Image: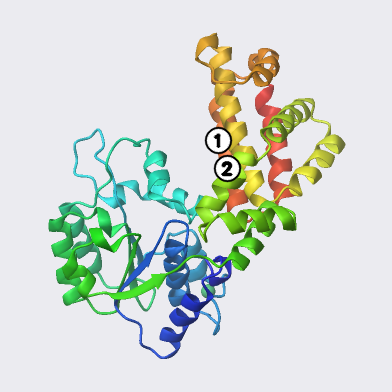
Amino acid sequence: MLFADIIGQQVTINHLRHTVKENRISHAQLLLGGEGYGALPLALAFAQYLMCQNRSETDACGTCAACRKVAKYQHPDLHFVFPVIPDKTNDIPVSDKYIAPWRQFILKEPYGTYTEWMAALNAEKTQGLIRAEEGREIIRKLSMKSFEAEYKIMIIWYPEKMNAEAGNKLLKLIEEPPEKTLFFLVAENSEFILNTILSRTQLIKIGRISEDALFVALKNRFQLNDEKARQIARISDGNYVQAKEYINSSVDTQQNYDNFIQMMRLSYAGKIPEMIAWVDEVAKLGRERQKAFLAYSLRMVRENLVLNQKQKQMARLSADETSFAERFSTYIHPANCGLLQQELDKAFMHIARYANAKVVFLDLCFKQNRLLRL
Ligand SMILES: [Zn+2]
């Protein structure tokens, strides 16, 4: 993630860049900011800036080997700690066990919330925690020399969820840090963080996103007109997550429905000129709406399988969706359902990572053409 991808927060970005320029990077920093203000994106962008092999005064290059690894959150010197849940194996849960879903989560939406993370783990009702065992893991990881970068960086998301034992282990490390190691703690509420940790970290307070920055982001990411973007920016209180919720609740489900029907008809028929014409239209929607459409399509495929399996009472479809699904569901069956979902998921990830929408959707149509005929 680049500084350029952050919504607003120019003052904080300037401050972070300045500490690099002056070589005054504090080894333990607490980025404290409310939900939707962008504390985690800032930590991610700062990590990339520090690891980039070819950074400019303003930003990481985005193209060097280190940037490419950080962009996938797979750089060997970039470590993550975040709240996790116990799994079925009875093993003690630590972040590394969940690193794959975590990467997906932050790739899809670096502005994601704790609640969304728990939902991504199918654990809405469980309390995510950073446990004592995590403290041991942190020590183990940081005792290794950095592999490639100048610094080892550990991003600790939600230290509020850290129990006292894990906190004390972390505290020792912060007091006597291994060489060239940086800790970025990313938190929303300082009241739930151990005082001893608070007193040993440098606080970077992240305020609301300015209305103007939010306005520009909403306009570009959701292709809203000026009036609508301004209206939502005004009522969202500098909170991007809140703004997204306002937009999604008003996003036209009818549009998703119409597009889904069209995409499946065109994919099945496999007529390339019509496909291209449709793809051109979808490409105009903007990245967030494309993601919403793909999420909608995933749900539709799943519900159509439920219908295909003759479990009508279990399908969660509106009246319109049911009338289309009555015929369409005969094309969705156990042999192709998982594969279709995989392709939709892949398309989602590609869109989230700024791939060319025309290429992604056209490719998706081709894949679906084959899968719908299985
Ligand atoms: Zn770079």
Tag 2: amino acid: Lys
Q: From this view, report whether residue 41 is shown above or below residue 11.
A: above
Is 159 on the left-hand or right-hand side of 331? left
Q: From this view, report whether residue 331 is shown above or below residue 363.
A: above
Q: CB of mark 1 within 8 Å of CB of mark 2? A: yes
Which quarter of the rendered picture does the C terminus lie within?
top right
Q: Residue pushed farthest right?
A: 273
Q: Nearer the viewer, residue 72 or 184?
A: 184
Please count the marks in the image: 2
Is 33 on the left-hand or right-hand side of 215? left
Identify the element where label 2 is drawn: helix
Q: Residues within 10 Å of mark 2 (few under 14, many from 20)?
A: some
Relative image position of residue 44 (x, y in whole percent):
44, 65
Image point (69%, 20%), residue name:
320
Q: Nearer the viewer, residue 310 or 89?
A: 310
As drawn, the label of residue 194 is: none
Mark 1–mark 2 distance (CA, rounded to whole Å): 6 Å
Image point (58%, 70%), residue name:
4
As drawn, the label of residue 342 is: 1
Image point (21%, 76%), residue name:
177
Relative image position of residue 340 (x, y in whole percent):
60, 30
Q: From this view, report whether residue 276 is shown above or below residue 304.
A: below
Is 252 on the left-hand or right-hand side of 103? right
